[in-house]
Image: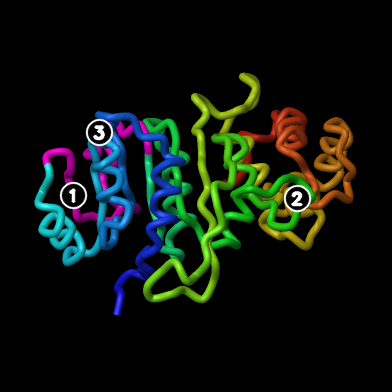
Amino acid sequence: MPRYDQHFLVSPETADRIVRAAGISPGQSVLEIGPGRGALTERLLNAGARLTAVEIDARLAQDIERRLGAPEGLRVVCADFLTMDLSALGEPRKVVGNLPYSVATPILQRLLDWPVWISAVLMFQKEVARRILAGPGEDGYSLLSLSIRIKARAEQVCAVARSAFRPPPRVDSTVVLLDRLPRPDLPEDVQEAAFFRIARAAFAHRRKLASKSISFATGIDRPKIEAAFARAGIDASARAEDISPEGFIKLARALKDFCGTFAG
């Protein structure tokens, strides 16, 4: 039985497509998260990557080195990516991973806050990928969607059927290419922390009006919140999933005087 919610990629075609999408240059520093049994690892090395592979399962980490013969370009680190000191990984230019479904979103969120990589090709559960790629008003648009749009550019690489894995998961998967932005796509007068406090409050209760959710989360009187919505040109009856990134930027400006009082 696999540990840590792992489903091992066994489709050569999918593995080749992922490595092609990563666009590895010979000698380029690459991080692989969750190499498992090495379906991507060997291909990344063959593409010329200077590869650091982070694997949480000690048995799998040892097996990769044994099977590949400890090649010069490979460093295997047995650790949990979510809790390890990322500075120990150096500054990889690119990231590749077939992420365990149960921790894929936290891994992505940690990556978005780590400013050393330039692009990532990652496998997600189809539903999570839909949220990553969704725009305002689309099914799946969420705080995760908004975070991606502020910090990266995302596009779908390919859909992956459950038959591409052993053991097969109960859902299909999607490979996504992320290009990290040099800095968050926010105007200089809008602080990132304040922007995301407002957005997090708006998405906290998806079935409620965004104005009501923000008022509840921040303690700011509802009339003041509705006045800010009016200044931002957003209907006070809008829900969070209807508000574009530009709309949240305008809200952050309109609520600037209150941002320091937000509880979190």
Q: Which is more N-terminal, label 3 or label 1?
A: 1
Question: Relative to 160, is 86 above or below?
Answer: above
Label 2 vs label 3: CA separation? 37 Å
Q: Are the residues tagged 2 and 1 within 8 Å (C-beta)?
A: no
- Residues rendered magenta in the picture: 72-94
Mark 3 residue crowding within 10 angstroms, few (<14) / some (14–19) / many (20+): few
Residue drawn at (65%, 35%) of the image: 259
Residue 61 vs residue 201: left or right? left
Residue nearest the observer in this picture, 137 or 203: 137
Secondary-structure class at tag 3: loop
Mark 2 or mark 3: which is in front? 3
Residue drawn at (67%, 42%) of the image: 198
Name the residue type under label 2. Ala
Q: Which residue is mark 1?
A: 76
Q: Which residue is mark 3?
A: 90
Label 2 vs label 1: CA separation? 42 Å
Name the residue type under label 3. Gly
Question: Relative to 24, is 3 above or below?
Answer: below
Q: Which is more N-terminal, label 1 or label 2?
A: 1
Q: Is residue 74 magenta?
A: yes
Secondary-structure class at tag 2: helix
Q: Position of residue 58 (x, y in %)?
A: 17, 63
Q: Which is more N-terminal, label 3 or label 2?
A: 3
Q: Is residue 219 magenta?
A: no
